[in-house]
Image: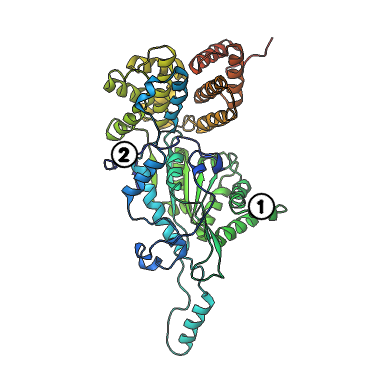
Amino acid sequence: MKRHNDHRIPEPGNTVDTLAEAYAPGDIFNDPIFALTQRYVDAVYHDRALELPEHADNPLILALPPFVNLDATLGCLQRRFAVSCPEACCTWSKERRLMAIDRIDRLLIILPVHITLLTWLHTALRNQLGRYRPGVNLHKVMQESYEKTQNGEPGVIADLVEGHAACRALVGMSGTGKSTAMRLVLSLFSPVIRHPDFRNPQYRFRQLVWIYVICPSNGSVLTFLKNILRWVDQHLDTHYLEEMRTRDNSGDYVEKVIYVLRKYFTGLLVIDEFQNLLRAAANTELLDTVVNLLNSGCCAMMVMGTPEIEPILKTRLRLARRVSNDGYEILEPFSNGQVYEMFVDKVLALNFLEKPTKDLGRVKSVVLGLSAGLPALIKLLVKLAQTVAIETDGEQITPKLVGQVQHELLAPLSGIVKALRKRNSIELAGYVDVLSGEVAEAHQRALSRSAGAKDFHDQVRDQTFASAVSSLLALGVSQSHADQWVNEVLRERPGSTSHGVVLEVLRRMEKSQSPTRPPKAA
């Protein structure tokens, strides 16, 4: 079953501005959404009447947030992750407003896919955790049933346990918001729950609600399995990686991972960048590993990746059968309609200019055409347009300005925009990963380096550096080369704005023998 992200519109009031259109790193403490999640919580068990009868006595499920009011949950997200754009911001200084424009990067609007994922996650966690009965003396229960059977009262001695676990896939080009959607939903659940006791002071345990790992860029099975154990070690203060240091057989690691995931009653394993397995010399091994984890029933699973993974999901029978049990979501660029209008209105509402947007309807039409409906490009266009408007004293977004920004700063992305407009799958194959989330991640890293700055002008300089680097990364310049170019320009022109720096770098790139690397100093 396929569900596309424009099939259902949230009811009024179910939209929310939240943090981050960012890449999902392996370390949650460096992530703008995950950083708000505590490492663990001590279990508080909600009213058993809120669960189905079969789950009413399961501490693993009673410790989860109850799924009773979707509107209230969305309202909570709105309050927790609100992005501020007060009316008085138009009176702020130029420097302050240039810094505030970066809030556009942190804007997120609740879309139908977020609601679908949240509903699925609540269901999948309960189905997965329902197979466990922590705190119950299974030997005693089975012994009593066995003795009754032996005394002439036939009955079930051992409960039937579901074999494989639930699995779902989330597919979309980089820039459509896959990682953000999943991270937003996961932010509603603590990754770790500690159970000090549950009707038995002698029985204590810890529960891994979810694990988030990234498929290694080289498709390595060992690296993938080690990343899972590393996540567990980081969050539970365990030493499973150390225990396996002398092993180099992937089969041993698979057994260890299954053992660990079962031991801590793991609910969900999220695998991001699943398309990376295609870069392995033999991707069948990693695919088989994923299927084996599913067949073991050790946890439910979500796989996320670019459209490259669709043929895998359709042609690899064992994996396709598992994933198709729960369907898969396809995140597509926006087309003109209610969903796009809702999204672009929210983006344009974050206006840090002195004047309101000119010819709003035309601006929205131009933005859609120049971005081909990619959320990441929509926000980048509006962000750069506001930056240029401030730096040129125009102080207003106009259709002409948006077109100018696309022509001068985003021309290298014209190929992907044309392919998206035509929905040409052959042309798109060359662009599926061009809008890497590393742009936002690198921007955040650059900003973090200014955290200790004491002087306001130093902070402005660091903000300029971060904005310029992120824009260059979006244009396809590598992280190291972008850093070199921007540092070189800022050393020579310390008062430059981010827009001015980017334009100067582009001019120098055209003159340089290397298209990405700055020329050596004379």
Can residue 516 be seen from the camera position used here?
Answer: no
Vertical arrangement, residue 280 with respect to residue 395, above or below: below
Q: Residue at x 45, y 54 (%)?
A: 322
Q: Nearer the viewer, residue 512 or 90?
A: 90
Q: Nearer the viewer, mark 2 or mark 1?
A: 1
CA distance for labels 2 and 1: 43 Å
Where's residue 11, x and y in %? 27, 43
Residue 126 vs residue 227: left or right?
left
Q: Position of residue 157 (x, y in %)?
A: 47, 78
Residue displayed at 40% across by 25% down? 417
Q: Residue at x 46, y 73 (%)?
A: 159
**Up-down: is 141 above or below 109?**
below
Q: Which residue is mark 1?
A: 241
Task: Quadrant for the C terminus, please.
Answer: top right
- Name the one closer to the observer, 363 or 292: 363
Kind of residue at badge 2 = Asp
Residue at far bottom of view: 151
| Mark 2, residue position | 6
Residue 476 percent coordinates (x, y): 52, 24
Which quadrant of the structure image shows residue 77?
top left
